[in-house]
Amino acid sequence: MSVLVTGAAGFIGMHTIKALLERDEQVIGIDNINDYYDPALKYARLAQINNDTNFYFEKVDFSKQTSLNFLNKKHPEIDRIIHLGAQAGVRYSIDHPNQYVQSNLCGQLNILEFCRSKMITPHTLKNFIYASSSSVYGSNTKIPFSENDNTDRPVSFYGATKKAGEIMAQSYSHLYQIPSIGLRFFTVYGPWGRPDMSPYIFTKSILNDLPIRVFNEGQMMRDFTFIEDIVSGIIGALDTPPKTLNETPPHRIYNLGNNKPVSLMEYINVIEKACKKKAIIDLQPMQPGDVIKTYANTRESEQALGYAPTTSIDVGIPKFVDWYLSYHS
Ligand SMILES: NC(=O)c1ccc[n+]([C@@H]2O[C@H](COP(=O)([O-])OP(=O)(O)OC[C@H]3O[C@@H](n4cnc5c(N)ncnc54)[C@H](O)[C@@H]3O)[C@@H](O)[C@H]2O)c1
């Protein structure tokens, strides 16, 4: 029995695999190591897990239609899937929509087809977990964001592809009874984090005495979620395959956030303290695709998955800055 993890060289993928290996799971990881950000960071993440004999890595682009055909022959023992690979990033999606169509729509379909192949007798797929995003809530003003809120109005194309991924998973779960869970992550940060995200960008600029661009003149709030809390939610979902209820297919969607939004200026203050330096702040107007506030209602994921985030930014940001300093030293 083994777990297939896509996006294995990514930020959340690597941490998830580490946690799976720590509990003696066999893990097959795939990633195309694209250059959306420095591939050296992706290889360095892989180096954290590559030495484990229970881990097997394959460089694969799952957006290509036949790319996953080898898996059933080479790894027939795969019985669970955690699909984290995607083209991420809200701002990049404005000018590069095709990359999102390829990885997040064609890729989602190919992974769902792989799930379908594992539902043919004997039914060997126990659970399919996939990454969605708080971006699906778009311009929602009702807070905190609940799984049942309307998500038909994304404000970024990235958010639109994540919403489409949920709908695609719903149809496959209905058609083939695939036990599936979509997880809406809220601004994940921590060691080995992404260079296109604000903890990394702000830390780098503050340490190098460069100005940081603060959008909407700092009038924003984010539900920053520490990577260890997210991983515990992913593992909780993996261990809780949904069942068909009356006519409802075995597909559920849960928020994984911190349930404690923080203002942008307070968060910058915590990074300044961890860097032991003041930021040079360059106030900017609101960016297209951005939202003013994200705030997760986590009651459903707490009840169903035992999700219990515990890390405040006062604890998580210094861990990120420590990692940043050691990685770049
Ligand atoms: N980090 C966050 O704050 C956050 C928030 C909401 C949702 N998410 C979602 O969580 C998932 C993981 O995000 P992350 O922060 O680890 O991003 P990441 O970019 O670090 O990891 C994604 C990985 O997927 C790989 N990938 C992309 N397209 C691929 C393809 N066609 N074939 C094979 N591999 C491919 C990339 O090379 C990358 O290593 C993504 O689905 C993302 O949309 C992340």
Image: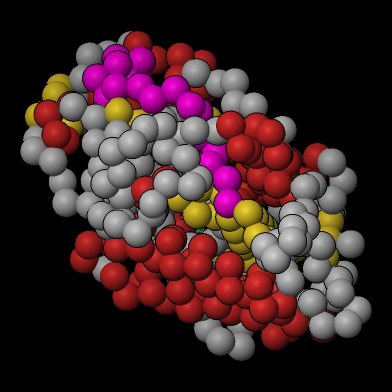
- Is residue 168 visible to the viewer in this orientation of the structure? yes
Quarter occupied by residue 325: top left
Query: Which residue: 59% across, 26% down?
Result: 309
Q: Position of residue 145 (x, y in %)?
A: 42, 38
The region drawn magenta spans 253-272
- Residue lying at the far front of the rendered structure: 246
Task: Reply yes or no: does residue 269 show up in magenta.
Answer: yes
Q: Residue at x 24, y 36 (%)?
A: 292
Residue 135 position (above or below residue 206): below
Q: In this rendering, would 250 be left or right of 329?
A: right
> Does the rendering let one see residue 193?
no
Residue 40 or residue 308, whichever sits in front: 308
Q: Nearer the viewer, residue 100 or 196?
A: 100
The C terminus lies in quadrant: top left
Residue 8 place in picture, x, y as percent = 61, 57
The one nearer the camera, 328 or 34, is: 34
290 relative to 28, above or below: above
Magenta span includes 52: no
For image coordinates 46% across by 74% down, the residue present is: 105
Q: Is residue 154 left or right of residue 58?
A: left
Q: Quadrant of residue 38?
A: bottom left
Task: Find residue 282 and report its horizontal and vertical position in percent.
Answer: 10, 29
Q: Is residue 76 above or below residue 205?
A: below
Q: Position of residue 276 (x, y in %)?
A: 33, 11
The residue lying at 82 percent from left, 83 percent from top is: 120
The quarter of the picture where residue 195 lies is top left
